[in-house]
Image (spheres, rainbow, N blue to C red):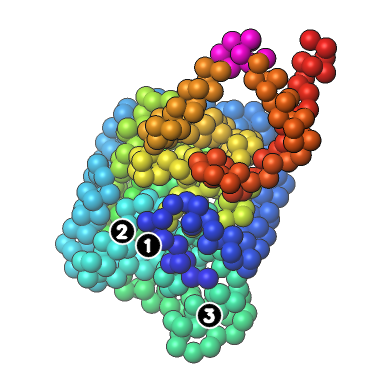
Amino acid sequence: MADNHYDYSEGFGARAAVSLADPKLRKSIATAVDIQARNRINALTSLADAEALRELGSQIRASAIARLDEHLERLAENWEAAGGTVFFAADAAEAGAYIVGVAEKAGATTVVKSKSMASEEIGLNTVLGEAGIEAVETDLGEYIVQQGGGHPSHIVAPAIHKSKEDVAGILSAVAGKELPLDTLELMKFARGVLREKFLTAEVGVSGVNHAVAESGAICIVTNEGNARMCTSMPPVHVAIMGMERVVGTWDELAVILSLLARSATGQKLSQYTSLINGPKRAGEIDGPTESHLVILDNGRSNILGTRYQAALHCIRCGACLNVCPVYRQLGGHAYDPVYSGPIGAVLLPLIKGTAEAGELAHASTLCGACYEACPVKIPLHDLLLRLRQDYAEEGAGRLEHAAYSAWSHAWATPGRFKAFGRIGGLLGRATGGRSLGRLPLPPLSRWTRGRTLPGFPRATFRDKRGR
């Protein structure tokens, strides 16, 4: 199934139905996330006290967000002192326009990109394409997805929804001939195509895993060498960073890195952990002559100081996706073309607004597995509950408000609660305690589309206790 079969003008339920109707997709996703989740558990055993490190990581992220203005100001000063340029982008349009301007000034016809969710968030490939500039994804998973005309379905593993047969079909179309169904041969072909792009691109674009305020350095974590190619071979480098992805010190970065790789891929440390501090200096051979750091707001500042601020603590490891029973069944595209899983279900309503994306908060069982897996202890289940409250307040109709008001009034005192319990007992005896299955009439029928309504008990708990 092609990624573009998802219609984002429809609701989450319709998109979820597309995923649920594709057993091949569901098998690919389930197999992949199960492996990732097991790898994370195994990697944590190398720590003397994993829970203590999680707590320290949580404190570091909370402190960084609490001092965000201070950290960003210091980061910008130090990046510029090293010869780089900083641009604060209020939204996606500003960020895209700035990067296009940089590319056009460099006379670019080709831009090579390493993996960056922030660039997906601002739709950078489309913006560059509209300006007549070719944007080429160089992370292997991103490259596969791009050539297939789709979007990443996982924060860490973009092509997690693709089978080997899917990949062979996509790359064979690029090659103009049938490629063998062999992983190494497919990788070799992609490497050959991308190597030429690295050598000819005028601009390289990367994301930023974290920036260190005290030094003005950015950190990029990957398992492929493409990020180093993108940031060192083209004469111009542009890094895009969500404004929250900053820590104060090197010591804090060390803690976050020890949590990130273990939670994301089950490694103690990723294959490539790159630290960049502006353009190349005089006398240096490698590196760009220009380094631009785009710090993206795009709704993040609206989250500061609210009861959702903890969502900004996220280090983008993807661990919550790997343990989420909803994501396991649907994959990422049912949520959104960019962010998915529990963290996506929290971030998207906050960035886009509850009117547009608030329904995603219901894409959760509230089992709490996401909190248990989160390396920085974000209370995702609590945030999802709060978003459900907001969505109900803003999106519920008069009938729904009236129903909940009546329910609240009916159960407001012990006497009323007891009376309704007796009514339930009467219904239970009348129906023999049988399950009621699906309700026939809206709006209650919506609730039983995916659930079986249990029957009423013949006696209340109070009756059984003789009270």
Disc 3 + disc 2, Cβ < 8 Å: no
- Kindly identify which residue carries mark 3: 169
First in sequence: mark 1 vs mark 2: 1
Magenta: main secondary structure: helix
Outermost left residue? 105
Position of residue 418 relative to residue 120, above or below, is above
Query: Which residue matches tag 2?
Result: 124
Q: For this rendering, which residue is in front, 381 or 399?
A: 399
Residue 376 appears in view? no
Q: Which residue in the structure is indicated by mark 1?
A: 113
State which quarter of the image contains the C terminus.
Answer: top right
* Residue at 53%, 88% in the rendered image: 178
Q: Earlier in the sequence, mark 3 or mark 2?
A: 2
x, y percent for residue 194: 42, 73
Q: Quadrant of residue 76?
A: top left
Callout 1 touching callout 2 (CB < 8 Å): yes
Question: What is the secondary structure assignment of the residue under circle 2?
Answer: helix
Q: CA distance from mark 3 to mark 2?
A: 26 Å
Where is residue 256 drawn, in percent x and y?
A: 53, 38
